[in-house]
Amino acid sequence: MKLEAFLIPEDVPSAKSALKRLGEKGFAMAGGTSLHFLAVSGKTAVDLSRLDLSGIRRKGGVFHVGATTTLDELMRDQGPGWVLDQVARHTSTQQIRNVSTLGGNLVRVFPWNDFPVALLALDATLCIEGVREKAYPADVYFDGQPFRLFEAGHLLTRVEVPALKRHQGFAYHKEVRLNAGFSLMTAAARVAVKAGRIAEVRLAAGAAISLPARLPRVEAALEGRPAGDARIEEAVATGASGLAWKGKEGMSDAYAAHLGRVVLADVLAAALRQAEGA
Amino acid sequence: MKPLHEIRFTLNGEPREFLVSPDDKLLEVLRREGLTGAKHGCGTGSCGACTVILDGRAVYACLLYAFQAEGRSVETIEGIGGFDHPHPIQKALVEGGAVQCGFCTPGMVLSAKALLAGNPHPSDEELKVHMDGNLCRCTGYEKIEAALRRVIAAGGAR
């Protein structure tokens, strides 16, 4: 991205005011690492990285994660029920993780973004602050490009991530060609088991489909089944059929579909094992 | 021509001022100042040859805009050691045969320094994770890793 100017506001109200004033010419940035992929010019960058929008605090059963929290901080163990370290660890390289932020992964969703898939599976809530704060469940936030929810002067301020409870399991997998490469297929699952049965499944995929999304037909095929006879592959085969898989980097669409089924089954199996306490 | 802006940051321990264009990347500003230890390798935030330390953390200078360093502290390879007084990491890499063409070496040194400043005794996994942003086409990495392990064992990472 070619910048016309930059502003370094001292506080959140100044940042919001600057973005509102700039309108289409304003551009909120924190780490700025994704700007490299945006072929636009003439924008004024509003640097959010020095505002009080970072940090991770646990309130009851929910982690409140500031939007400008770096991926490096997300990689660190935050205590029982914290799972986003699994995602952060596999995102890019340490130099990127040291400046890239959670918010930067969520405001503009590129197909390869890692965190939207995880947050869909975790039933997270994303908070946008304009004049007032509005909280969006992940299912709503990611039902399209998120910037549709923002007006000039609005900021993503934090993400509320439920801590994983007992009898819940979470798994995340990203298929890449190179260790630090963009994802070719991403999947995340959260599974809850009660009284030996699968009580709840939240399954999301990304990268090989146009936007991160949940797979409700797979979820429905699994919920209620005995945990010991989940028939995961069967559920994935029928529930994920009909999705518009898209291969990348020389991969055919048909192979992407096959890879998708394998990865989805893997994350479901891993999450189920954790939920059962295996 | 875009107007130039004055930015201030601490560079290798000294407060400095620079006139920059909004588009200028930190790497360009450093190299214009004669600090050519940070290299233009890939220019896309992948190879690590441009690595510098910003507020104690290894970053890609080719991706960061110069203004992102405003008010912060930047360390380059020139600031941590040289021929007369090499940093222990530099010394270990040279003595361990872990330098061939040398193009990746400044970035390797700085990434390692940043890691060890915060975690003097990283596990093998932690070392691999924190060095995953520095590529080397020459050495195959084993001698680099071995040299870093010797530095860690000697406790001489600072």
Image (cartoon, coloured by chain):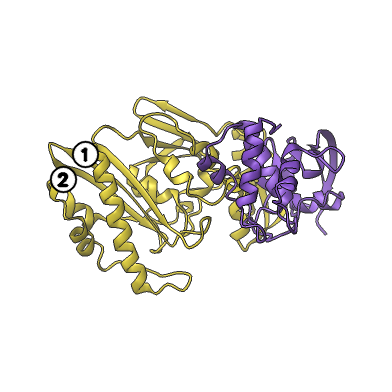
Q: Quadrant of residue A266?
A: bottom left
| Colour purple belongs to chain | B
Which residue is found at the position 62% from the left and 33% from the top?
A: B153
Amino acid type at mark 2:
Ala
Name the quadrant of the C terminus of chain B.
top right
Which residue is found at the position 33% from the left and 58% from the top?
A: A263
Secondary structure found at label 1: helix
Name the quadrant of the N terminus of chain B.
bottom right
Residue highlighted by disc 2: A227
Mark 2 and mark 1: span between their CA atoms? 8 Å
Q: Is residue B99 above or below residue A156?
A: below
How far across and how far down the image is residue A47, in percent? 65, 42
- Taking the image as shown, residue B55 lies to the left or right of residue A141, namely right
Furthest residue to the top? A60
- Front residue of A196/A159: it is A196
Disc 2 + disc 1, Cβ < 8 Å: yes
Amino acid type at mark 1:
Glu
- Front residue of B125/A141: it is B125
Q: Report the number of numbered marks.
A: 2
Q: Chain of mark 1?
A: A
- Taking the image as shown, residue B143 lies to the left or right of residue A261, namely right
Q: Chain of mark 2?
A: A
Q: Is residue B82 above or below residue A111?
A: above
Q: Quadrant of residue A36?
A: bottom right
| Colour yellow belongs to chain | A
How far across and how far down the image is residue B19, in percent? 85, 47
How far across and how far down the image is residue A232, in percent? 20, 55
Residue highlighted by disc 1: A276
Q: Which mark is residue A244?
A: none
How far across and how far down the image is residue A220, in percent? 18, 53
